[in-house]
Image (cartoon, grey):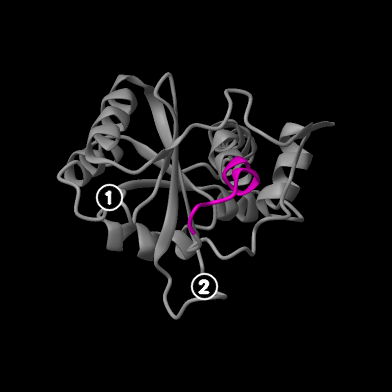
């Protein structure tokens, strides 16, 4: 089993400007296949489910970390939403992330929830870390899952952790889809 502490492609800088967000949108448009999305909240520290970091990954479209507070009123958000709506979106445990993504302006239309897919496929453990271990033979560092994501600046090890959450989702989606297909449950 391979232990991952940072994504193979490295951890990108956090997007905090309109220009950087437009660049993210352009890169995602050039990518192929589904887009993996995740959000980090500070629910244990704040009285809201607001996103304090949004992570995106698309093959050939890059890995992106967005500070939704810094770009909350960016004119690039509708364009980002259009790109996301144009393809399948992969989210792990989507019921947790969809409300804060929608609050930011991201509203996926075609969704593959890896947690739900794993449940339907009969996987014993459906947490992201457990699925990565059993299906991808990867061990993810998960020690930063309960930090206060509203703190600025975000610690580098937190960003590495958050980037890993989406860097593996496309491969995980493919493995879960294979399981579901073999059981005639993909549809």
Of the residues under marks 2 and 1, which one precedes in the sequence? 2
Residue furthest toward the left?
75
Q: Residue at x 54, y 75 (%)?
A: 45
Q: Is residue 154 rendered magenta in the image?
A: yes
* Rendered view: 69 above or below 86: below
User: How far across and how far down the image is residue 30, in percent?
Assistant: 31, 19
User: How far across and how far down the image is residue 119, in percent?
Assistant: 63, 56
Query: Could you say whether the residue bearing mark 1 is in a helix, strand or loop?
Result: loop
Query: Could you say whether the residue bearing mark 2 is in a helix, strand or loop?
Result: loop
Residues marked 2 and 1 touching at CB (< 8 Å): no
State left or right for residue 143 relative to residue 8.
right
| Residue occupied by mark 1 | 71
Which quadrant holds residue 145? bottom right
State left or right for residue 111 relative to residue 71.
right
Q: Residue at x 75, y 55 (%)?
A: 125
Numbered disc in front, either 2 or 1: 1
User: How far across and how far down the image is residue 136, in percent?
Assistant: 72, 33
Q: Residue at x 65, y 45 (%)?
A: 157
Identify the magenta region: 152-160
Q: Residue at x 59, y 53 (%)?
A: 115
Which quadrant holds residue 172? top right
Crowd rating for badge 1 (residues with CA inside 10 Å; few <14, some 14–19, many 20+): some
Marks 2/1: CA–CA distance? 20 Å
User: How far across and how far down the image is residue 186, in percent?
Assistant: 52, 41
* Rendered view: 174 above or below 132: above
Please give the label number shown on residue 43. Answer: 2
Please give the label number shown on residue 14. Answer: none
Q: Is residue 54 rendered magenta in the image?
A: no
Crowd rating for badge 2 (residues with CA inside 10 Å; few <14, some 14–19, many 20+): some
């Amino acid at each position: 089993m391979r232990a991952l502490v940072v994504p193979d492609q490295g951890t990108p800088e956090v997007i905090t400007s309109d220009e950087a967000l437009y660049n993210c949108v352009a890169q995602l448009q050039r990518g192929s296949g589904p887009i993996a999305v995740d959000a980090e909240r500070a629910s244990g520290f704040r009285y809201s489910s607001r996103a304090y970091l949004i992570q995106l990954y698309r093959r050939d479209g890059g890995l992106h970390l967005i500070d939704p507070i810094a770009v909350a009123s960016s004119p690039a958000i509708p364009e980002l939403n259009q790109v996301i709506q144009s393809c399948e979106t992969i989210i792990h445990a989507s019921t947790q992330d969809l409300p804060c993504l929608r609050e930011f302006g991201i509203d996926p239309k075609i969704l593959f929830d890896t947690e739900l897919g794993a449940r339907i496929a009969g996987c014993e453990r459906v947490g992201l870390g457990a699925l990565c271990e059993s299906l991808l033979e990867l061990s993810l560092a998960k020690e930063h899952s309960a930090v206060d994501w509203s703190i600025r600046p975000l610690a580098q090890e937190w960003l590495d952790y958050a980037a890993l959450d989406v860097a593996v989702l496309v491969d995980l989606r493919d493995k879960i889809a294979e399981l579901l297909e073999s059981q005639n449950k993909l549809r």
